[in-house]
Amino acid sequence: MKASKIAYKPVGLALGALAGMAAGGLFKQAWKVIGHDDDAPDATDEDRDWGEILLAATLQGAIFAVVKATVDRGGAVAARRLTGTWPG
């Protein structure tokens, strides 16, 4: 494995953690608008129906995937600008 890939690993992990936190915050804000409720349903919420639970899960997954891809790609582009090599 190249040294640039090894050196990028901790950066990638830190960016991933930040992406997860950002995605969680975005999901909470989106659910307040879409769900008209402060708390998104959990799969085991007895008072919520299937449609609401599946909508929340779909929205959460989509937001997480977009934020993660954006952060991962931005980190890789920044690493190439700094080092001249692609980290992936």
Image (cartoon, rainbow, N blue to C red):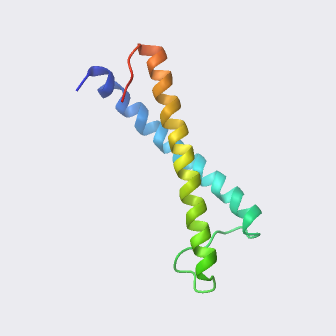
Q: Residue furthest bottom?
A: 46
Quadrant location of the N terminus?
top left
Q: How many marks?
A: 0
User: Looking at the picture, does residue 50 appear above or below residue 33?
Assistant: below
> Residue at position x 32%, y 21% from top?
4
The x and y percentages for residue 87 are 37, 26
Residue nearest the observer in this picture, 8 or 57: 57
The x and y percentages for residue 43 are 52, 76
In the image, taking residue 84 as reference, residue 48 lies left or right, namely: right
Residue nearest the observer in this picture, 49 or 26: 49
User: Looking at the picture, does residue 80 appear above or below residue 16?
Assistant: above
Residue nearest the observer in this picture, 34 or 39: 34
Q: Locate residue 2: give its quadrant.
A: top left
In the image, taking residue 61 as reference, residue 7 lies left or right, namely: left
Q: Residue furthest left?
A: 1
User: Looking at the picture, does residue 49 appear above or below residue 6?
Assistant: below
Q: Locate residue 14: give its quadrant.
A: top left
The x and y percentages for residue 86 are 39, 22
Quadrant location of the C terminus?
top left
In the image, taking residue 26 as reference, residue 13 lies left or right, namely: left
